[in-house]
Amino acid sequence: MYTKKKFSGLTMLRWTRRELRFFIIWSLIVTALYEVLGLQWLQVPWTALALIGTAVAFLIGFQSNAVYGRLWEARQIWGGIVNDSRMFTIMVLDMITNEYAKDPATEEELAAHKKTLVMRHIAWLTTLRHAMRQLKPWETYRTNKRNSEWVEA
């Protein structure tokens, strides 16, 4: 997925150069067959073309909306995890005290317990981050040869 805020025309041309070449060549062939050789059966009615174009526009619009919804939901979930992590750390630092302890611990022991809890939580966050970045069996964009130039090594 492309996540930068700007999308230049040059970048678009680089991403679609193979498809552009194919459609330009295909268009030239069809135009030559129609104009030069006089194959009139290649005519396409405007009504069908407009209908198909409208349907494709709706499909792309719905697909973009669904993708944005998934992205927004993921950002909300990750934001919730970040906020809960901050609250957990604040609670650990504030609530682990000798206030109600039968056998008070030293400040060094309390600091060690606090550090252990916070570090374990950081380890959980790191594990979650790495688990989310693992390739899934259904993700085939890395195995496609045409995508090799766009995939970070």
Image (tube, helix red, strand yellow):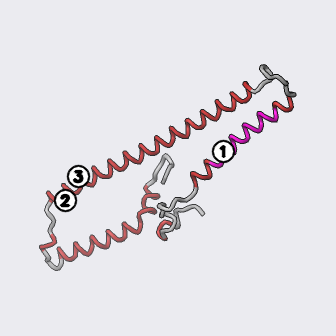
x 73%, y 37%: residue: 117
Distance of label 3 from label 2 (alpha carbons): 9 Å
| Residues at marks 1 and 3 touching, judged by CB atoms closer than 8 Å | no
Nearer-the-camera pick, 23 or 116: 116
Q: Point out the stretch of residues depicted in magenta.
A: 111-127
Task: Name the quadrant of the C terminus.
Answer: bottom right
Point out the residue furthest to the top here: 99
Nearer-the-camera pick, 79 or 112: 112
Residue 87 at what x, y percent from top left? 64, 30
Q: Earlier in the sequence, mark 1 or mark 2?
A: 2
Instruction: Tell me, for residue 49, which label it has, or none.
Output: 2
Q: Earlier in the sequence, mark 3 or mark 2?
A: 2
x 12%, y 73%: residue: 41
Q: Residues within 10 Å of mark 2 (few under 14, many from 20)?
A: few
Secondary structure type for disc 2? helix
Point out the residue furthest to the bottom here: 37
Distance of label 1 from label 2 (alpha carbons): 54 Å
x 66%, y 44%: residue: 124
Magenta segment: does it hold 118? yes
Secondary structure type for disc 3? helix
**In the picture shown, does residue 29 fall above or below 64?**
below
Amino acid carrying mark 2 in the image: Leu
Distance of label 1 from label 3 (alpha carbons): 48 Å
Amino acid carrying mark 1 in the image: Trp
Q: Magenta span: helix, strand or loop, mainly?
A: helix
**In the picture shown, does residue 17 fall above or below 7?**
below
The residue under label 1 is 124
The residue under label 3 is 54
Amino acid carrying mark 3 in the image: Thr
In the rendered image, which quarter is residue 102 located in?
A: top right
Q: Residues within 10 Å of mark 3 (few under 14, many from 20)?
A: few
